[in-house]
């Protein structure tokens, strides 16, 4: 088979949903750091969001499955921890998708600027930690709905 | 050789991660349960990085898992503080606060280490531990200046754990950095939080030693390891 281009591989990866937050892709999440051909081996560099995040191994499995289906035979998944993942790498499209899904996107100020449900700016923190390592729990004091906030790190 | 220093870092996060995870399903409120479990998860993730690198550099065919599950208490090099039992929620959070305050200073320094693999793990961990310290500090303050009962429990927790603080700043050539140099920054931060929490720093600086050198662990470590290691020890080839 002819070697698919790196751009083509990126487009395949962009179709893989994050296992915990399926509304965004692993490319939106910013954890794919590099894609390159080393002779006839495709090397994909992945960085973990949080060091203990259990989704990391599932993500690697999904990358492998998706690329095998596309006919990639020699695949190497490289783990890279430096520079450490930052929410700055989350794409703008990803941030918009998070908010429409009901998860407030990360803000440099350290907290959400508005409720993802009713857009009120009257919000308060419930807990520094949430349902996954990357999220905190907040609530809106207008519509009273609790919501997840994607922590800014 | 960096292996003994890497094992110290990894044993601290492993033992505290295991201790904190004992709360899973038992914390006083759902949010606290989730926060404790998330903290434990971060610590275990960091353990995989520290012990993974230690095993690789040691070159004896061991892995992070072998180091975690197939060593006995006397081979562990964690601080005595982290093996202390959970007791009540106040003791657990005070232990976390004291450890986080040391941990963040140590990691911030290690993030600048000349060894790029060490600095990479520290840079990754700093982000997580910044959150840990923020939460444990907030909790110590909230409970310290809370009710008469919560205040008394937090002061008792501080008095009980204080003799284990000194060991964090004892140092020798095995450490990845000079731990004694971290004390002034720790003391400054501690003072700020304790003042806000209306808690009093104990006067005596007597310190129990022997965890990070392995010379004398407290009796609690062996009991904890027995629970943690029983499955891989009973069924060494078990997979799932």
Image (cartoon, rainbow, N blue to C red):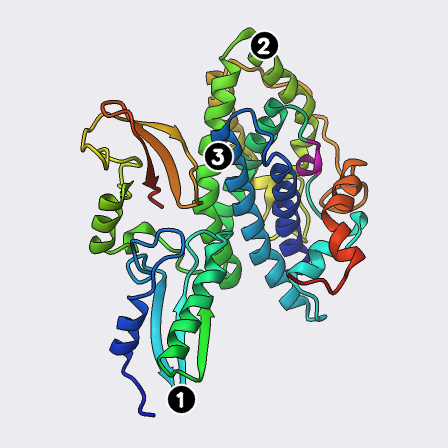
Predominant SS along the magenta part: helix
Task: Measure how far apart labels 3 and 1 are at the Cα level.
Answer: 46 Å
In the displayed structure, A128 sits above or below A27; it is above
Provide residue A122's location: percent of width, then percent of height: 23, 25
Question: Closest to the observer: B49 or A53?
Answer: A53
Q: Are marks 1 and 2 on the same chain?
A: no
Total labels: the figure holds 3
The residue under label 2 is B149
The residue under label 1 is A40
Label 3 marks a residue whose chain is: B
Residue A43 occupies quadrant: bottom left
Q: Which residue of the protein is positioned furthest toward the left in this rendering? A: A119
The residue depicted at 34 percent of the width and 92 percent of the height is A1
The residue under label 3 is B133
Which element is circle 1 on? loop
Magenta-colored span: B80-85
Question: Closest to the observer: B181 or B80?
Answer: B80
In the displayed structure, B59 sits above or below A51; it is below
């Amino acid at each position: 088979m002819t070697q698919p281009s790196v751009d083509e591989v990126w487009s395949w990866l962009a179709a893989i949903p994050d296992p915990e937050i399926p509304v965004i892709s692993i490319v939106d999440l910013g954890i794919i750091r590099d894609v390159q051909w080393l002779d006839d081996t495709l090397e994909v560099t992945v960085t973990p969001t949080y060091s203990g995040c259990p989704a990391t191994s599932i993500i690697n499995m999904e990358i492998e499955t998706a690329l095998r289906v596309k006919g990639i035979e020699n695949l190497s998944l490289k783990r890279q921890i430096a520079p450490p993942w930052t929410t700055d790498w989350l794409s703008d499209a990803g941030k918009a998708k998070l908010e429409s899904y009901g998860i407030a996107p990360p803000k440099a100020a350290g907290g959400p600027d508005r409720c993802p449900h009713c857009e009120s700016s009257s919000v308060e923190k419930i807990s520094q930690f949430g349902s996954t390592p990357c999220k905190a729990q907040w609530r809106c004091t207008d519509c009273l709905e609790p919501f997840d906030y994607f922590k800014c790190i | 050789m960096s292996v003994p220093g890497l094992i110290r870092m990894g044993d601290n996060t492993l033992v505290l991660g295991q201790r904190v995870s004992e709360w899973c399903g038992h914390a006083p409120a759902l949010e606290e349960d989730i926060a404790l479990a998330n903290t434990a998860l971060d610590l275990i993730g960091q353990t995989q990085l520290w012990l993974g690198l230690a095993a690789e550099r040691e070159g004896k065919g061991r892995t992070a898992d072998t180091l975690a599950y197939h060593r006995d208490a006397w081979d562990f090099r964690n601080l005595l503080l982290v093996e202390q039992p959970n007791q009540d929620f106040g003791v657990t959070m005070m232990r976390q606060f004291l450890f986080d305050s040391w941990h963040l200073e140590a990691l911030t320094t290690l993030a600048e280490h000349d060894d790029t693999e060490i600095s990479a793990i520290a840079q990754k961990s700093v982000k997580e531990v910044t959150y840990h310290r923020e939460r444990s500090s907030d909790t110590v303050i909230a409970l310290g200046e809370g009710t008469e009962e919560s205040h008394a429990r937090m002061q008792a927790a501080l008095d009980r754990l204080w003799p284990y603080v000194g060991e964090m700043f004892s140092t020798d050539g095995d450490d990845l950095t000079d731990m004694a140099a971290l004390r002034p920054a720790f003391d400054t931060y501690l003072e700020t939080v304790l003042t806000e929490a209306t808690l009093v720093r104990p006067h005596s600086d007597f310190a129990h030693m022997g965890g990070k050198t392995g010379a004398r662990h407290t009796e609690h470590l062996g009991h904890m390891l027995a629970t943690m290691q029983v499955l891989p020890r009973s069924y060494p080839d078990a997979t799932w």
